[in-house]
Image: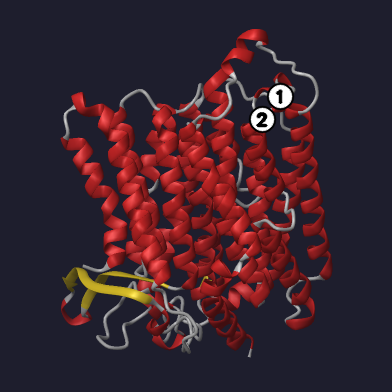
């Protein structure tokens, strides 16, 4: 069996096992879930180590760039004289996918450990957790649009219940808001997907196809079809390919999230339990960035280039707006949620530059933010589980009470604000270098966008350092008085074992960014070459 298939479906097999076990064995559910995620992590590390780099690729619209490929017929319907409906189970990865898969697998292990705080309805929680795990990994592996969409929509169901049933006081509101926002984007994505299916034919069989790689090649489009490059068809008076790009971009921008489509994120984070917040920030936001790279830029490259200024502008607005909002927050979890909006803005800015530096920086930023946001939300959960409070102004002098905890908070804060030596510094430096270079290389972005991105880094230093100063330094002063002093014990062994690898990875990626950049380089160069051909 293909190892990608094992990677995708391992969690659901253990999820079914949990559903079959009697409730009297509920104490074992967390261990089964942890074992499933660890097994998945082993598979992803094997894939990473055996992923070949340095090959000469023909471009992103050629299947030769993708590795560990498995293609099987899935849904086949005879349409008579028209041909056949061709939907395949088609999975494979490139350099961008492989790094995100390893990150996702590790984040799911951390989320599984954080799930040990859940005490109610354990069977339902862990079964939904593993279903979500399968869906997010499937998205990063799918190369058939129908399969991609299936996994993409499948994420909605478990997240809706995980927030709505195990969340905070306003969990129903947050869950419904998240569900409606995401569904709004994906419903219209379905229409574009069908339009692309009707516009593209498999060059071998002659049948219409959902194959994403075939959709990237203009030669596979039927002459006169709605999304054909040469047909110049219109939808509602606008170029059809522009409409297709905008619809898909909105669907993925909601996930990133890009301002002004971000408002579901702070509510979902604040109400979600710690493990779900970890998955939301660590993995779900990256699916938005990945979708923009794989689908929007891959299928509609000429629209991505013509609208690069607007993509860069949205990235800059997200960087600054998210940072200013983070500066104004009292709730520690909400502050970190807005910092995610700011940091993910760098991803959009890097992609808009269409330079090798910018796109490499964007991918590294997604991987770096995946680990750092996981660490930050786990740290918030540590304090919240002890005193059930997250208000920054209700804590002071925690450095005296919880010295080990304070060390990890300082590592997470300094790494997130872009201190040299940590992963975010390299990612943001590459992103800004790409944005700055863009003006002279391809004329897509003006210099001031790179300057505004730099201001965003300065603001992130402001809100992280101000929070550190208010909560951890000075004489001990707690809203809960002596009761909180007793409750606020330092990190236990489980928490230390969880946080230490995340801190080491943030440092390792800062010192050796080639761990990511070495894998993504071929795919990034192929993407840049692919889009430059459009300019010609």
Residue 403, label in figure? 2
Q: Are marks 1 and 2 in contact (CB under 8 Å)?
A: yes
Mark 1 burial class by Cα count in 10 Å: few <14, some 14-19, many 20+: some
> To which residue does mark 1 refer?
400
Quarter the N terminus occupies: bottom left
Residue ID at (54%, 82%): 526
> Measured from the top left, where is residue 40 in percent x and y?
34, 54
Position of the C terminus, as image quadrant, is bottom right
Give the camera-side residue of 234 and 386. 386
Spatial CA span between label 1 and label 2: 6 Å
**Number of numbered tags placed on the structure image:** 2
**Can residue 67 be seen?**
yes
**Residue 310 appears in view:** no
Q: Is residue 498 left or right of residue 138?
A: right
> What's the residue at 57%, 16% (across, down)?
487
Which quadrant holds residue 337?
A: top right
Side of 77 where 527 appears, left or right: right
Where disc 1 sits, the SS reads: helix
């Amino acid at each position: 069996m293909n190892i990608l298939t094992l990677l995708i479906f391992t969690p659901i097999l253990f999820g079914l096992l949990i559903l079959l076990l009697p409730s009297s064995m509920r104490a074992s559910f967390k261990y089964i879930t942890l074992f499933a995620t660890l097994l998945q992590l082993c598979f992803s590390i094997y894939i990473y180590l055996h992923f070949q780099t340095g090959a000469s690729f023909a471009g992103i619209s050629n299947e030769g760039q993708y590795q560990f490929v498995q293609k099987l017929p899935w849904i086949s319907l005879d349409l008579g004289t028209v041909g056949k409906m061709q939907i395949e189970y088609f999975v494979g990865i490139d350099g961008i996918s492989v790094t995100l898969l390893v990150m996702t697998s590790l984040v799911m292990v951390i989320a599984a450990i954080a799930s040990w705080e859940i005490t109610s309805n354990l069977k339902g929680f862990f079964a939904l957790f593993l279903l979500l795990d399968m869906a997010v990994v499937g998205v990063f592996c799918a190369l058939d649009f129908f399969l991609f969409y299936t996994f993409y929509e499948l994420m909605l169901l478990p997240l809706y219940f995980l927030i709505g049933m195990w969340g905070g006081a306003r969990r129903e509101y947050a869950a419904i808001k998240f569900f409606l926002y995401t569904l709004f984007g994906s419903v219209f994505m379905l229409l574009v997907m069908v339009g692309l299916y009707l516009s593209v034919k498999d060059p071998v069989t002659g049948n219409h196809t959902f194959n994403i790689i075939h959709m990237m090649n203009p030669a596979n489009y039927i002459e006169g079809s709605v999304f054909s490059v040469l047909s110049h068809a219109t939808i509602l008076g606008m170029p059809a390919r522009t409409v297709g790009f905008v619809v898909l971009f909105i669907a993925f921008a909601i996930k990133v999230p890009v301002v002004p489509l971000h408002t579901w994120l702070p509510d979902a984070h604040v109400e979600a339990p710690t493990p779900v917040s970890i998955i939301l920030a660590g993995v779900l936001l990256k699916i938005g960035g990945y979708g923009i790279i794989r689908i929007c830029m891959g299928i509609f490259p000429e629209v991505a280039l013509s609208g690069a200024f607007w993509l860069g502008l949205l990235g800059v607005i997200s960087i600054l707006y998210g940072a200013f909002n983070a500066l104004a927050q009292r709730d520690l979890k909400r502050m970190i949620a807005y910092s995610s909006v700011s940091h993910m803005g760098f991803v959009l800015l890097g992609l808009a530059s269409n330079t090798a530096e910018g796109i490499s920086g964007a991918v590294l930023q997604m991987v770096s933010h995946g680990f750092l946001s996981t660490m930050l939300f786990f740290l918030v959960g540590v304090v919240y589980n002890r005193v059930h409070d997250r208000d920054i102004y209700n804590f002071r002098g925690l450095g005296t009470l919880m010295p080990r905890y304070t060390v990890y908070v300082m590592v997470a804060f300094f790494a997130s604000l872009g201190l040299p030596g940590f992963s975010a510094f390299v990612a943001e430096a590459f992103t800004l270098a790409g944005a700055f270079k863009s003006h002279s290389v391809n004329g897509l972005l003006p210099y001031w966008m790179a300057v505004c991105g730099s201001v965003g880094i300065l603001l992130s230093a402001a809100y992280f350092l101000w929070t550190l100063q208010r909560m951890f330094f000075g004489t001990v002063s707690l809203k809960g008085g002596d009761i909180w002093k007793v409750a606020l014990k330092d990190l236990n062994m489980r928490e230390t074992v969880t946080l230490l690898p995340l801190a080491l990875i943030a440092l390792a990626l800062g010192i050796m960014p080639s761990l990511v950049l070495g894998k993504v380089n071929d795919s990034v160069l192929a993407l840049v070459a692919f889009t430059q051909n459009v300019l010609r």
